[in-house]
Image: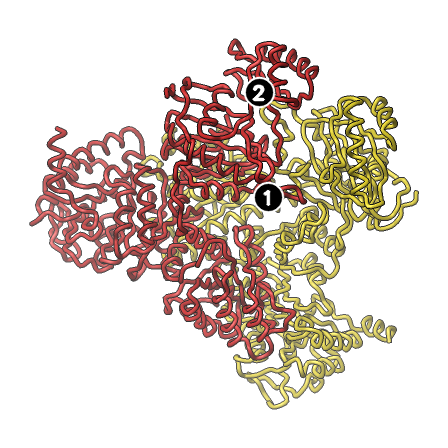
Chain colours: A yellow, B red
Amino acid sequence: METGVEEAEASRPLPIARIVAPRSVAVVGASDDVGKFGGRVIHYLLKHGFPGLILPINPNRATIRGLPAYPRVSAAPAPPDVAILAVPAASLEAQIADCAAAGVGACIVITGKLAEAGPEGAALQDRVLAIARGAGMRLVGPNCLGIFNPVDRAMLSSSLALEEEGYAPGGIGMVSQSGALMGTLLSFGRHHGARFSRCVSVGNQADLALEDFLAFLVEDPATRAIGLYIEGLKDPPRFRALLQGARAAGKPVFIVKAGRSEAGAQAARSHTASLAGAFPAFEAICRDAGAVVMEDPQTLVLACDAAIRLPPWPAPGLGLAPIASSGGSTVTFADMMPGAGLRLAQMSDATRAALARWMPETHVALPVDTGSFHEGTSGDGLSDCIRAFMADPDVGAVVVPMTTQPDMAGRTSLFPPLARDGGKPLLYLMTAGAVGDASRDVMRAADFPFFDRMSDALAVARALDAAAAGRAVRIAPVRPECAGPSPALPRGSLTEGEAKRLLAAYGIPVTREASAPTADEAAAAARRIGFPVVLKGVSRAVVHKSDLGLVRLNLRDEAALRTAFAEVAAALECAAQGASEGCVVQEMARGEAELFLGATQDSQFGPMVLAGAGGVLVEFLQDVAMAPAPLSLSGARAMIEGLRVAPLLRGLRGRPPADIDAAADALMRLSWLAADLGPRLAELDVNPLILRAAGQGAIAVDARATLTEEVTT
Amino acid sequence: METGVEEAEASRPLPIARIVAPRSVAVVGASDDVGKFGGRVIHYLLKHGFPGLILPINPNRATIRGLPAYPRVSAAPAPPDVAILAVPAASLEAQIADCAAAGVGACIVITGKLAEAGPEGAALQDRVLAIARGAGMRLVGPNCLGIFNPVDRAMLSSSLALEEEGYAPGGIGMVSQSGALMGTLLSFGRHHGARFSRCVSVGNQADLALEDFLAFLVEDPATRAIGLYIEGLKDPPRFRALLQGARAAGKPVFIVKAGRSEAGAQAARSHTASLAGAFPAFEAICRDAGAVVMEDPQTLVLACDAAIRLPPWPAPGLGLAPIASSGGSTVTFADMMPGAGLRLAQMSDATRAALARWMPETHVALPVDTGSFHEGTSGDGLSDCIRAFMADPDVGAVVVPMTTQPDMAGRTSLFPPLARDGGKPLLYLMTAGAVGDASRDVMRAADFPFFDRMSDALAVARALDAAAAGRAVRIAPVRPECAGPSPALPRGSLTEGEAKRLLAAYGIPVTREASAPTADEAAAAARRIGFPVVLKGVSRAVVHKSDLGLVRLNLRDEAALRTAFAEVAAALECAAQGASEGCVVQEMARGEAELFLGATQDSQFGPMVLAGAGGVLVEFLQDVAMAPAPLSLSGARAMIEGLRVAPLLRGLRGRPPADIDAAADALMRLSWLAADLGPRLAELDVNPLILRAAGQGAIAVDARATLTEEVTT
């Protein structure tokens, strides 16, 4: 009854804000025994001071924890906003039906062994969902750990993390596809003084999904930074739009995505397919929308917290200024920075002068060892130097890696005001064990973050830098002149010539070529094009021509060309398996460097472009950048300049720099090609794009493409 | 009075074992006030139960902490084994002189502002050292934090780390050039239940150096693993020998070396100089001797502890088996593994069968989510699966990333016996905050390591794998046939021809070549060698020939050669700056791949060889391996096979594999060349060495070298 469902949904959709902060909660399976799921749920509601009405549901008890109990939800005096179900899978369907009948707004289903356990569980989950949909009742879960909302003291969860005392409200909003991981992170964050707004474990997302709660957090006034643990998306385009919304709202988003390493494990079939695995596209979309993808869930929480409780990292690409009284700790911290993608700041003259007031000129350098301060000055000197770093335009953040020392706690109290006044992050590291606890307590009391690990502080600094890049202004892509439309092209693998015609239609320079059915025609074509030339054997059946002897480069004269023609024609006969398209003669392009450009269609996010090291390097150097299409010229240029091979393009050892502008223009045009063809373009590779010296252009020398359907103009 | 000093040293050298475990200790500057250095030293001696005689030294007090005090050390009834001095720099010289006169065995000098503070302090340090040397008295420090010896309850330090209660004795020996960092690590380690044997802060190493204490720890029966924090070595060859000694003694050594990032910062002048910075050579020496160089001092301590308290990682290169009840935590852990240089294990059929007893066949995969176990079986199932992994030949260690869950502490107690019985490391991760403390206490009580961070467990797994590689049997280098001696060669930069004669003398194949003063002679040489040929202009003044138009490849006939000769001769005239050596004609070598091979002289460790990606790649890919010369053939092969470009050598996309054996032979021979020439060879590059298809050899196509002195045969 499709219509009935629609009506019911329209009549009773409890908004997410009410699910997260319900006025009344039924606990199905409530118990006095905190060893049971339902016992813990009611215990935690009480323990954390839930201000609304609690309805324990238990057919065998008149009261639970002193509250009147009811045999079923439908027996309660009024339907609650939310029912929490932690019942065995076998009784779930009946309980959900009762909730639906009673008029419950939403069920939080902690019960597991549903879709995640196999086909039987999936069928049960479908039946449960159908009951809920039929009644317009929302579901969180199943197989979730519920909702954690310190802002409204609504701890709707059985997570053991709620054993901790006093989760004070704060600004970190989280959505997690792993409940156990989320609970762990709450407890981990609490150790550091991090505070949360609303955290939701979404479980199997039968009804409400991560995207729904993300949408809520983007709008939620209590939430100032968002942390996501994602296994897979239900609605990728909506997810992308929500990240853009968070960016517009000034809320940084930090994400850990499970399955990163799967991308690496995918068999390398053809270039683009092996490089365009799900994770790289996901990461590209997040970067494009200003969100920060991290590796480690623990540092994810610390990054969210730092983004809220520390002043902002001013701009992307700035350096760090480590300063402490232990040379050993500052130097080892500085040594770990390059591996984390971070660098030391370049001190300004003013900063150098400030340091020179406190220490011998010979010791003025980063990292700063305050042990070299003139005797008796280290307290004032430390503050003064930190103020100088805070004012230094190349400093992104100051790092203080404390080691055991006299009056650690007293020294610690210096830092929060210095960070506040300086207006930049100060990353305070307390790497000792219990002997550092007094210092940690000072920071908790000052509402200031601290780090226990050098590696944590490094990961957070990297994330804050990336968040600054995420905030930076983006130039909107604008279609260039002479970009499209595509010529008519057949379905399937294109020949090199067809692929190049497609490129040329978007204004991407390609090598001149002429087909050459005979040696005489090849010679004539070569005379027109001008020696030296390239001879290629063409077949739709061959992907890697050079491996099969079908490419002969640098043919300098007619004799060489005729010899090569005989050889290539023979090889083509052999390799083409009846799909020979004959030989072509091409212009021999030379340049300073080469790149690989690619376009592909991500199954979740649509058209994407890639740029990477050219030639055979693309196969084993993992030096590929990806971005959603279309791109602005500056976006294309940033992709290329971020490659590890970029120094090669800029001209090594006095060689002329390559024409990066022309390469960026070609990539930008390729991005419009990919955007226009959309899912009709399965993949397109330009390998190599040869870059001539700066100002002299770039040219596509080889190209291949696959279309999923015919393109008609 | 050189002789007098020698005599005094001979008559009174207190052995390090007695310095580390003295029978009597004088505390100069002793005080009742624990706010003062000397007050803390005496407080910590008493607090940690020093069993020997304590002599407080203070001119103004009759007793301190209830012990009889003396105005100076020489006034004590008998000279103590050790005096600890935490006096101002101004009074240090007089106090040292008094200790020397009194017959003290060794002084631990905590006092700072000596050599590390500038020339004035350095002069004072020299005078203090001269006094000590003159009396045969040993010095630890100055500018150190002393010695920490829980085995003998001798805590001879003012480190605040001694505020912690009860450092039980254990097997970790440490030597650190940073006292504050060491104190921090002791406290950090204690949190994890790690236990130490003897830890020494060596400070400025005026007399006793890191190498001296390392020698002691290698022999010390209480020490089972060694951690070193190194800023710079005093005696590199002895250090190397001591690492080899530790390896022979079965004691793993883990090292953090400060200044790693300097290597990256060095300006890239010529290849070898930029690649052969101090850190890479240090790391190569350590790896060769079986020691493990790490980045992070915190994980250094955890690695030492894991090496002692866990069963050994069986063999290098094995995989990890993550298993836990949270899919989120096991998957994110697995995702972080490749970045840490680790991989998942490949399950054996027996392991798969064991897992299939507890979970649906469809879920049998690594990482294991015990949430997918059949209902009601997770306790037994977890143990059973861990047993299966322990027995699996591809498993190096089992990892259990716990998240918040019911009965965490009870579950935790399962693991120590499983690790003991299984005989492999089990890395137990408790990532929650305070809610995990009961589990941490279970592990402390069971004397079993735990980790608070995924990143810590990853770094330790990597270190244990590296330690297993360090234990592996090494094949001793044996000089091959036809290796040397060197021909007579001049001092300074060699020409390509000279460098190649040197290579040829060690049996490394080089391209045939002939000098060609005129175009006619070039043509005659080319006919002898056979077309195609290479023409090069030679000058001692030119390092990078191809940048200046002095190299012409692939000249196919005499006409092409003559044209090229005219151009190259003109370019040479221009570039050679009067140092022209004329043109040479060379065989044109072709192959499947190319490598860079190099030899250099490390200022600390002597002759080293390098191998890396060939051609222009060596400039910006940091894909270079280094090892001390000479090398065995298997050592040379391992270097090449460990390169990131190795997949290219093995044959990508059906290309024939390159002759890695021949490249390894060339590298091994180059290592003997480097070892024979020793410091006379400043550097030698072979770039490229062209590798033909497997079985067809490798050939040095270009080479350059610099000698610091003339070589005569």
The answer to whether residue B473 of the structure is visible from this angle is yes
Residue A287 placement, left or right of A299: right
Give residue A289's position: percent from left, percent from top. Answer: 70, 48
The first of marks 2 and 1 along the sequence is 2
Q: Amino acid at mark 2?
A: Lys
- The location of residue B15, given as percent across then percent down, is 18, 47
Q: Kindly identify the residue that appears in the image at 60 percent across and 61 percent down.
A: A197
Query: Is residue A352 shown left or right of residue A670?
Result: left
Of residues A438 and A431, which is closer to you in this image? A431
Tell us which disc is closer to us: 2 or 1: 1
**What distance separates the C-alpha of mark 2 from that of mark 1?**
30 Å
- Compared with B197, B122 (above or below) is above
Depth order, front residue of A494/A250: A494
**Quarter the N terminus of chain A occupies:** bottom right
Query: Where does label 2 land, which residue?
Result: B545
Horizontal relation, residue A530 to residue B69: left or right: right
The answer, for residue B72, to whether it is visible in the render is no
Instruction: Assign the C terminus of chain A to one quadrant of the image.
Output: top right
Contact flag, marks 2 and 1 (Cβ < 8 Å): no
On the image, which quarter does residue A148 sit in? bottom right
Q: Position of residue B78 (x, y in %)?
A: 8, 49
- Mark carried by residue B140: none
Q: Looking at this rendering, what residue extends furthest in the front direction? A: B528
Label ID, residue B650: 1
- The residue lying toward the viewer, choosing from B242 and A281, is B242
- Nearer to us in this view, A114 or A406: A114
- Tag 1, which chain? B
Vertical placement of A117 versus A500: above or below? below
Q: Is residue A270 left or right of A255 when viewed as pictured? A: right
Q: Residue at x 60, y 24 (%)?
A: B587
Label 2: few (<14), some (14–19) or many (≥20) C-alpha neighbours in 10 Å: some
Q: Chain of mark 2?
A: B
